[in-house]
Image (cartoon, grey):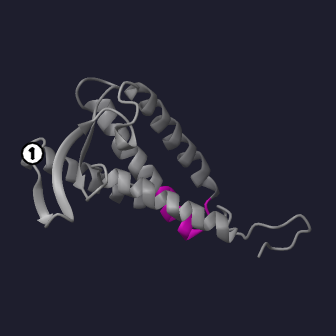
Amino acid sequence: MVALIGLAADQVTKALAVALLTPGEPVPVVGDVLQLVLLRNPGAAFSFATGATWVFTLIAVVVVVAVLRVSRKLGSRTWALALGLLLAGATGNLVDRLVRAPGFARGHVVDFLALPNWPVFNVADSMICTAAALIVLLALRGTEIDGRRATGRRGAPRA
């Protein structure tokens, strides 16, 4: 459910951004703190590797498949949330790469959220970052995907 709701939120917000915003013209939402700016990003975060769009398409496919395979072992609601957000974000940006111009597997991702001193991003990007933070926290707490606590070498739970 998290993945479906997240994917819907990402695609609806991107469709609204494309329909209502003029590329490159900022629209203040909260002064200079949050603006809407329509950009099309052929690369990864921070417009990195803009000539390798097909690579990011492939990476997104691998992430989606990996999350779907791992999700069969879920026994933790927090892991389900983290993986649902990761799946939604990866799928949201993958949809852009598959169906948007300039063509299949080379499409540019729609970005539209702008914060000061930060690259323009989208809802899918924020879900991926939130998922990453949750996964780090779960790993630090020693929570396994099945919900059990990780054990040390002697069989006792890690502190």
Tell me the crowding category of disc 1: few under 14, some 14 to 19, or many 20 or more residues within 10 angstroms, Cα based. Answer: few
Q: How many marks?
A: 1
Q: Is residue 74 left or right of residue 157?
A: left
Q: Residue furthest right?
A: 154
Question: What percent of the width, then of the height, locates residue 30?
Answer: 15, 68
**Relative height, residue 155 to residue 110 (above, below):** below
134 part of magenta stretch? no
Q: Is residue 9 above or below residue 150?
A: above
Q: Quadrant of residue 52?
A: top left
Q: Is residue 117 left or right of residue 28?
A: right
In the rendered image, the quadrant that contains the C terminus is: bottom right
At x 58% / y 67%, what residue is drawn? 137
Which residue is depicted at the point 31% across and 24% down?
A: 104
Residue 2, percent across and down? 41, 61
On the question of residue 75 being in view, the answer is: no
Farthest residue, direction bottom: 159
Q: Quadrant of residue 56?
A: top left
Residue 117 versus residue 54: which sits nearer the camera?
A: 117
For the residue marked with disc 1, what is the amino acid? Answer: Ala
- From the viewer's perspective, tell me whether residue 110 is left or right of residue 152: left
Residue under label 1: 19
Q: Nearer the viewer, residue 146 or 155?
A: 155
Q: Secondary structure at mark 1?
A: helix
Query: Residue placed farthest to the front in the image?
Result: 117
The residue located at (45%, 28%) in the rendering is 55
Main SS category, magenta section: helix
Report the span colored magenta.
Answer: 74-84
In the rendered structure, does residue 81 fall within the stretch colored magenta?
yes
- Residue 86 position, x and y percent, is 46, 53
Q: Is residue 19 visible?
A: yes
Q: Is residue 101 above or below residue 133?
A: above
Rendered image quadrant of residue 47: top left
